[in-house]
Image: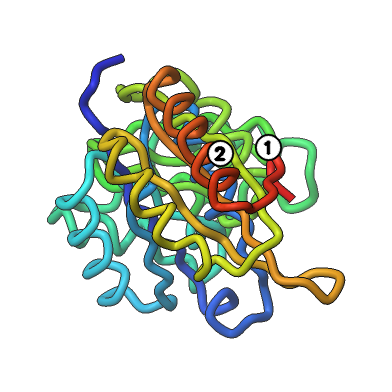
Amino acid sequence: MTERIYTAGLVVIGDEILSGRTHDKNIAQIASWLQVQGIRLSEVRVVPDVIERIVEAVNALREGYDYLFTTGGIGPTHDDITVDAVAAALGVEVVIHPDARAILEKYYADKPGGLNEARLRMARVPEGAELIPNRMSGAPGIKLGNIHLMAGVPHITAGMLDALTGTLEGGLPLLAETIGCWTPESEVADILRQVETAHENCQIGSYPFFREGRVGANFVVRSTSRDELRSCVDSLCDGLATAGFDFTPGGI
C-alpha cells in the first residue's frame, strides 16, 4: 500500500434502475468493498440500456479513474448489451470465451434446456478479456484492463467482489469516525470548517437529520492516517464542547 490515492468509477446500467422498478444496492456495496481495498469510489453514472450511452460513460470513466466497474446487462436476454457496449468502447470484437463456455456447460448440464443459445450469451466477452469467478450462478464476470463487468443482481455482485478481493492495487484504506450532535449543522459550520482547515489530511462530512421532533447532524471524519484522524476527531470534540454543544461519539 502507498500514499497514492487510487480511484474508481462505476456505471450502473439498466432501464429498471432509472424507472424505479428496481432499487439499486450495488453502489453502496461496491463503495464499501473498494474502501477496504484502498480505492475510493469517485463517480457513479446511471445509464439506460442504450449502447451509445453505455459507450460514452465507459470511455469517460475508464480514462478518468484507475478502475472502472459496471453493474447490469451481462445476462442472457436481448437487452443485456453491456459486453457489446464495452467492446465498442474499446474497439475490439465480441467473442465466446472458451472457459466461460465450459463453466456454463457444466452449470446447465443437469438443468432443463441445457446450454441453449440464450444462456450461451453469458459466455460472450470483449476479445482479450479475463473472467471473474461467480460461485452463485455460474455465469462469470468479466475483466479487461482496468474495466470490471459485474452482475446487476446484488448477491451475485457480492460474490464477484469477493473473488476480486486482494487482486487490485490500492492505497491506504480510508478510515472514518463519526460524531453526532443534536444541533442544526448551520450552527456549527464554522467549527467544522476551522477543524478541517487545521487538518489538511482529513475530510469532515456533515449529514443532517430530523428525528423525534428534533434537528441534529452526524459529522463523519475521514483520513488514511489513524493518528491524524484521531487528532481531527479530538479537535472537533474540543471545539463543540468549548462552544457549548453536547456531542455523541459514534454518532446518533
**Residue shown at the point (52%, 50%) measured from the top left:** 120
Badge 2 local density, few (<14 within 10 Å), some, or many (20+)?
many
> Of 27 and 91, which appears nearest the observer?
27
Q: Which callout, 1 or 2, points at the residue further toward the start of the chain?
A: 2
Residue 111 percent location from the top left of the image: 78, 44
What element does badge 2 sit on? helix
Residue 3 percent location from the top left of the image: 23, 21
> Of 101 and 249, which appears nearest the observer?
249
Nearest to viewer (mark 1 / mark 2): 2
Reply above or below: 50 against 175: below
Q: State if disc 2 and disc 1 touch (CB < 8 Å).
A: yes
Q: Which residue is mark 2?
A: 237
Amino acid carrying mark 1 in the image: Pro
**Residue shown at the point (37%, 26%) measured from the top left:** 224
Badge 1 local density, few (<14 within 10 Å), some, or many (20+)?
some
Residue 119 percent location from the top left of the image: 58, 53
Residue located farthest toward the right when viewing the structure as drawn: 212
Residue 60 percent location from the top left of the image: 19, 61
Residue located farthest toward the top when viewing the structure as drawn: 1
Reply above or below: 60 against 35: below
> Of 87 and 18, which appears nearest the observer?
18
Does 110 sit left or right of 115 as displayed? Answer: right
Q: Which residue is mark 1?
A: 249
Reply above or below: 33 against 184: above
